[in-house]
Image (tube, grey):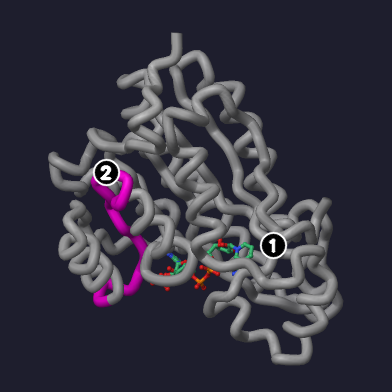
Amino acid sequence: MSSVSSSSSFDLSGKTALVTGASQGIGYAAAERLAAHGARVVVAARSEDKLKSLEGKITEDGGVALAFPLDLASPERVGDRLKELPEEFSGIDILVNNAGITADNLLMRMKIEEWDRVLRTNLTGTYAVTKALARGMMKKRWGRIISVSSVVALMGNAGQANYAAAKAGLIGFSKSLARELASRGITVNVVAPGYVTTAMTDELGEASKTELQSAIPLKRLGTVEDIASAVLYLASEEAGYITGHVLNVSGGLYI
Ligand SMILES: NC(=O)c1ccc[n+]([C@@H]2O[C@H](COP(=O)([O-])OP(=O)(O)OC[C@H]3O[C@@H](n4cnc5c(N)ncnc54)[C@H](OP(=O)(O)O)[C@@H]3O)[C@@H](O)[C@H]2O)c1
């Protein structure tokens, strides 16, 4: 029988989540949403001030949060840093691997430093956080690992070979982990956003945004809330029979 009651939709009380890249954009919205559904949330990124302000906002709204500075560009140090989580936040049940950067260039102009920087933060950083936190989930025999990829991983995008390779890497990584961890009650899934209005897409000019919009069947860019909803669903008890899935949230840009 289902363990889910109709009165507790997406109820995450008793769960602790960690969201990377939570200082702004999609990660910020996802952290707020998980907290609004009862999860205690560790918000991680490099910008401590922004994390503190999110911690304050979640607390003000009646939730529980902890600002936790973490730099994924040094994946070798991530495991030790995560051991410094205070006891009351140390048992992470839900991991949202959201932090990501771009360093766009056409291949012929792409420096190895640009390739390496994007792979290191977006893919190796995710490996490091996931490895450090999966053990606790295995012990509890319950867990949710959700990684934020991109439709660019599925479609390709000129000028983003490094980013697309890293984001496609997240999909292979997640599908493999889904198989490794299923017997421990851990689901591993991917959210693949299309174009979402955030600092990352602010870099696009108005003309490119209008052109993009016309290529999207639902005729608008996504919002951070659109992506947060997908993350919340995959984090929930309700999504317990979904693993190894790539949830494309792109307004139909990728079909
Ligand atoms: N916006 C889109 O259209 C779109 C589409 C598809 C996929 N995505 C993906 O969605 C995720 C969030 O994107 P967004 O649009 O919200 O981007 P954003 O506004 O640029 O936010 C990126 C987040 O990642 C964090 N971050 C960057 N480097 C980091 C590092 N070395 N260590 C720890 N955290 C780091 C940033 O925090 P700090 O700078 O404070 O460290 C920030 O919180 C990314 O993975 C992105 O690739 C975005």
Residue visible at 81% across and 67% down in the picture: 157
Residue nearest the viewer, comparing 211 with 46: 211
Q: Residues within 10 Å of mark 2 (few under 14, many from 20)?
A: some
Q: Residues within 10 Å of mark 1 (few under 14, many from 20)?
A: many
Residue visible at 45% across and 45% down in the picture: 232
User: CB at mark 1 closer than 8 A to ligand 1?
Assistant: yes
Residue 229 forms part of the magenta stretch: no
Q: Amino acid at mark 2?
A: Gly
Residue visible at 44% across and 54% down in the picture: 75
Q: Amino acid at mark 1?
A: Gly
Residue visible at 65% across and 35% down in the picture: 245
Q: Contact, CB < 8 Å: mark 1 with mark 2?
A: no
* Quadrant placement of the N terminus: top left
What secondary structure is marked by label 1? loop
The residue range painted magenta reads: 35-49
Q: Which residue is mark 2?
A: 38
> In the image, 242: left or right of 135?
right
Give residue 230's position: percent from left, percent from top.
54, 48
Kindly identify which numbered label has been placed on residue 58: none
Mark earlier in primary sequence (1, 2): 2
Q: Which residue is mark 1?
A: 194
**Marks 1/2: CA distance?**
28 Å
Q: Does residue 81 show up?
A: no
Placement of 119 over or under 17, stated as above or below: below
